[in-house]
Image: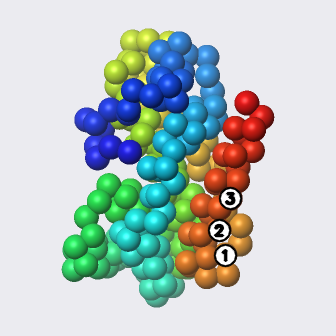
Amino acid sequence: MGTSTSHRSPRTPEWRAVREAYSRGGVGPAEIVRRVLSAAGDDFRSLLADDAVRTCLLSLEGPAGAPAAQLRREAQERLGTQGQASVGGELALSALSRAALETPHGRPDPRDFVAQLLAATVEHLVARDLTEHVGEGAAPDVGEAAALLEAVRQSALSTWRPAEPSSLEASVSGAWSALIAEEAGADAQS
């Protein structure tokens, strides 16, 4: 998956299709999300199994109405204490903060956390390659590149809502099962 925006995507045919969307333009954000999910393969699918992601997810069991900063700080402390440093953990911390900000007077819904995690991850994966294509089709300038990145993030966020979880752990498992089933269906239609 890469460890930062300075580590580009692999040079596989699947990632080539993603990069073509940037260079040629005319591909909508939802299609870019679909291509990214397809190209990322097992690395992306393993994200929800990351111990740091689970630690952030389980931090949602904290007190209802806890400020986003408090949830994030407590999750960061747990991650540090448990030695769980990873890209997935950083993305999960971002997702945790965003999910908490959406529910300022209650406990963030695990489904919102998972949706925010997917959106943050897709945004990360797009950002690491999009800079190579500024001045081309989908990103003729920096402003358009930023707008595309935000549109892709919003598309990932708005299309991802896991089934009703019976517990926090079930939310992770159910969300990923749904993603894999959705991707298998999209691949079968291709």
The residue drawn where x is 56% and y is 42% is: 37
Q: Mark 2–mark 3 contact, CB under 8 Å?
A: yes
Callout 1 secondary element: loop
Query: Where is residue 3 drawn, in percent x and y?
Result: 29, 46
What whole-number distance in Å separates the C-alpha atoms at marks 2 and 1? Answer: 7 Å
Image depth: mark 1 or mark 3 in front: 3
The circle drawn on residue 174 is 2
Disc 3: which residue: 178
The residue drawn where x is 52% and y is 30% is: 14
Pointer 3 local density, CA inside 10 Å: few below 14, some 14–19, many at least 20: some
Q: Is residue 160 above or below residue 150?
A: below
Identity, as a three-letter code, of the amino acid under mark 1: Pro
Q: Earlier in the sequence, mark 2 or mark 1?
A: 1
Identity, as a three-letter code, of the amino acid under mark 3: Ala
The circle drawn on residue 165 is 1
Q: Mark 2–mark 1 contact, CB under 8 Å?
A: yes
Identity, as a three-letter code, of the amino acid under mark 2: Gly
Task: Looking at the picture, tell me which residue is in the foreground, 130 or 71.
Answer: 130
